[in-house]
Image (cartoon, helix red, strand yellow):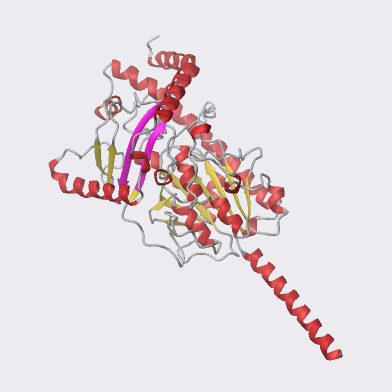
Amino acid sequence: MKTKIGLLFLGFLMAACAQRQGKQEVEKRPNILFIIAEDLSPDLGCYGNDLVKTPVLDALASNGMRFSSAFVVAPVCAPSRTAIATGMYPTSVGAFHMRYPDELLPSLPENVKTLPQIFRENGYATANIKDEIGNGKYDWLFKVAPEHKFEFESWKEIADQDNPFFAMVCSFYTHRDFAKAEEGQFDLEKIPIPPFYPDHSVTRRDFANYYASIEKLDIQVGKVMDSLQQYGLAENTIVAFIGDHGRPMSRDKNYNYLTGLQVPLIISIPENLQKPKEYQKGGEFNRRVNSIDLSATFLDMAGITAPENMQGQVFWGEHQKPESEFLYSATDRIGETDFKSRSIFNKKYHYIRNYHHDFSVNSSATAYRKAKHPIYQLLNILDERGELTVAQKALVEEMPAEELYDIENDPDEMYNLANNPEYKSVLEDMQAGMDNWLKQIDDKALGKDSQEIVDAFNAYGDSSRAKFKNLEAKLKKEVEEAVGLQ
């Protein structure tokens, strides 16, 4: 009898130990936090901008890794966020137009899941933080069903969970309207102005305000890091910081140039957590990384196998995939403008195909942009006065059907080689690469839009033009005064 009781007790102890060990194993799984900034190019101190003070993000890079070649799949927020959320190209899942009315949002295909959904199914708590910093933004281009969403909205809620967490914090910075730079905060004469923008005080002040917004963003990231410490989460949390696309300037956001696609990406892994062999504290990761790959990579770091149909690939660690020869991007309807543009690039060349191009970069601006972008007004004014350089003039001339740039020797993408006979073979190779990609992902945006979609976006344009009419007139007057026309 004593032997039987002893065996039962021993079995109980073994079961308890196994349960406790299992819980410890769960607890060892890393927390993962995405911090997503809006409209941000690699313009941080740790990326070489010595005018902007970003001590928090610089420290995050010093304690982690800075990615030198990170790109997004769309140069505007909602398609880009859709790709991050699903690990799928928006054009592949049928969710690609920016600003669908709610009733016309497409449903996500049944075989496609969101990251919070996958993490939750694998024992993770999920949260889209909504506080003084996190705005709880989704901005996904599909009908967000209950199973797609995050569970919680606060640090306290996830801190109270026994399970590890996958969380997201979305900051409004550095979206327009910008913070206003204080007098003397930046030396305007030292601000590097891309050659395709007029080197004018209007441009410099706009960049200064953008820089001021970056510094505000840095303060916000500091508060996020403080929250991790406050709730005892810092030692087990991998932190990833990324911009959802490039800076909100006239030729950058909305357009498939590299300035609209390249973003800062910093990933910091605490000392006590397992790290990929490629990870070097304070180092630079030079492999080209696509934002669509964050999904599969962080699932892998959490010990979760990504769905077979997920298009994102693991970019480091034991299960990493070879670096892709090409990276891709796409733009379709953005508000009242119907772009339909595709982009493919390798380390040497960038090819852009503009299916719609009966407009210029400047004339394709949305009503919102005309009311908020001083450089838009400046380009028009200086064009009328005949004061634009060749590179600047390109922004007010009709866009070409095809563009080809040697991004190794022409990083500003100023010299279109598509019609240069010396680059015919390069052009043909890039065209073939584009065609293969469109076929491979089954690009659903290349077909004709339904009349419902056309009518809805036309109505959006009418409403937007009426809404911003007075603000556009006010901004135009301000820029005219700065140019000396008043």
Is residue 337 in the magenta section? Answer: yes
Q: Residue at x 26, y 18 (%)?
A: 386
Q: Nearer the viewer, residue 88 or 386?
A: 88
Q: Residue furthest right?
A: 1
**In this picture, residue 114 sits left or right of residue 397:** right
Q: Position of residue 457 (x, y in %)?
A: 43, 27
Q: Main secondary structure of the magenta part?
A: strand
**In this picture, residue 435 sits left or right of residue 252:** left
Choose top left, top right, bottom left or bottom right for residue 136.
top right
Is residue 457 in the magenta section? Answer: no
In the displayed structure, would residue 81 be above or below residue 160?
A: above
Does residue 466 appear in the picture of this structure? yes
Which residues, given as a range, are shown in magenta?
328-348
**In this picture, residue 52 sits left or right of residue 398:** right
Q: Position of residue 332 (x, y in %)?
A: 38, 35
Q: Residue at x 78, y 83 (%)?
A: 10
Q: Position of residue 349 (x, y in %)?
A: 26, 47
Q: Nearer the viewer, residue 49 or 297?
A: 297
Does residue 51 appear in the picture of this structure? no
Q: Residue at x 64, y 55 (%)?
A: 234
Q: Nearer the viewer, residue 465 or 397?
A: 465
Q: Nearer the viewer, residue 446 or 87?
A: 446
Image quarter of the N terminus: bottom right
Q: Residue at x 30, y 42 (%)?
A: 411
Choose top left, top right, bottom left or bottom right for residue 262.
top left
Q: Residue furthest left?
A: 421
